[in-house]
Image (cartoon, rainbow, N blue to C red):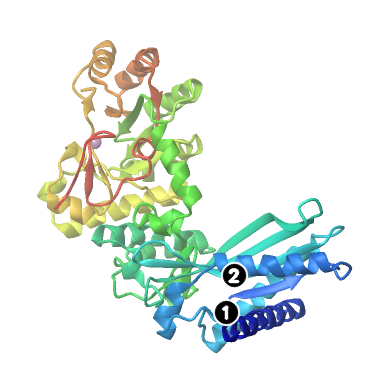
Amino acid sequence: MHQQKKENERSKDTLKRLLLLFLISCLGLSIFGTRYFLRETLDYSSTKQIKKAFEQLIQSEQQKQILADMYTVHKGVEEKTLYGFFFSEEEHETVVAQLEEKTKGAAIGLGGIPSAVLSYISEEDIDETLTHRKYVTREYRWAQEQSAFVLEKEVAELFDIRAYGSRDPLTIRDVAKDETSLRGITRVLQEAILEKHDNPEMILQDVLALPDITFEDEGIVLPHALQLRTDPKVFGFDTIDLEYSALFPAIDTLFLDSAFVEAHEIKKEKREKRVALTFDDGPNTQSTMKLLKLLEKEQIKATFFVLGQMVTAHPTVASKIVEQGHEIANHSYTHPDLTKLSSDIIHNEVKKTDEAIFRATGILPKTFRAPYGAATQEVIRTVGLPMIHWDVDSLDWHSSDPQAIANKVLEEVRPGSIVLMHDIHERSVEAAPEIIRGLREQGYEFVTITELLFDEQQPYYQYFSATINQKNE
Ligand code: NI
């Protein structure tokens, strides 16, 4: 008897709680920390059946969305209440307003048959370092045959990334993996500042002189971007957002959209017989222009490692290279042997070429090739851009016979090869049609350097082909 009574009381309690929840939901209210913000959207006052189904829906959703982590971390007790999330008062206001907006927004589109919209916050531990916070909005429609609400649509929106466990805000240290990452992020920062500024040429020198960011720099980790501070006196704005997709591969893939990562993987899987033709030491108005015409006719993309002084002399040819979809890359300003120079002079060679390329084309190069391929570890560090070498040397600087140049390339090329040629020699341009024809016959696809490396190239690394690379330690 006693037992029976207790159970009765318990079920009464449950009923009361459900009713309260239901009322709260209907009123669209939210208590502090409530993880559900429910809102009925249509008139279903008519039948008891629908009301009951709605209650059931809420109940089952609650059971599915368990937030045990939150309870233990923040409350120290295992308490399966509705109070899963603990935001500051300020945060709480924003979060509730957001949930309300999303619920109302989804409700607008519903009509005709009884529907329910349910919005809540979901926390998802991505791994042992990161936790995602998402707004989830679910739309249900009444299905008469099933006598139930059926999920029709779910929208999840990431709004916050926190440290796993502590739920602390993240810093640059959490985003950047190592020094290589910091260097890579700095380059993206330079590009972003130039893009954001109304008159990029005016601040170009300052942008290129920016020191590398450090782990200690102030940075805000937003859901889709890393927000960094900039000097407003120099650039006119005090923060800049760097989209995570632009920071690939400098950052952990955990920060990237799963769609981005998937698309990237698919691209890599599809890797076929690919080859990157590279042309050094230009551009000039004669042979480079001829080559560009040929590549356009053949619909082939190549990479041009240009000299800063040549770009300064022939900026329109440089801009044509970019217009036609080729990649333009840095090959120093005056073509010196960098291994014999001080780091200051090396810096200057790189910087002046970056500057010339930007003024001519509006972009900053992503890769570097050392003159004569001469790069010590110190040179690689000082340059600070991915160092691109080659595995097939056409010897076009040496040979005077276009056929011999073509034969050398066709004999040595392998899937993933980087072919070294020079667009400043007429004989190289004369050899190009034969090379293109021969490679096509062997089933090769022509790609640029960054395409060949799937955009995974990183500073302080050297690349000889798609598969041969090494880190400068
Ligand atoms: Ni060269």
Q: Residue 353: which numbered mark, if any? A: none
Q: Is mark 1 within 8 Å of ligand 1?
A: no
Question: Where residue 140 sits in the image (x, y, percent)?
Answer: 72, 59
Instruction: Please give the residue where the numbered disc 2 appears in the rendered image.
Output: 62
Please report the residue visible at 25 percent of the width from the left and 13 percent of the height from the top.
407
Question: Where residue 200 sits in the image (x, y, percent)?
Answer: 48, 61
Please report the residue visible at 50 percent of the width from the left and 38 percent of the height from the top.
323
Residue at the far left in the pictured view: 340
Structural distance between the alpha carbons of marks 2 and 1: 8 Å
State the quadrant of the N terminus: bottom right
> Is there any visible trace of residue 314 in the rendered image?
no
Q: Nearer the viewer, residue 371 or 445?
A: 445
Please report the residue visible at 67 percent of the width from the left and 82 percent of the height from the top.
12
SS type, badge 1: loop
Of the two numbered discs 2 and 1 on the same chain, state the one appearing first in sequence. Answer: 2
Q: Residue 82: which numbered mark, if any? A: 1
Q: Is mark 2 within 8 Å of ligand 1?
A: no
Callout 1, which amino acid?
Leu
> Is there any visible trace of residue 180 in the rendered image?
yes
- In contact (CB < 8 Å): disc 2 and disc 1: yes
Left or right: 3 in relation to 69 = right
SS type, badge 2: helix
Total number of numbered discs in the rendering: 2
Name above or below for residue 298 compared with residue 195: above
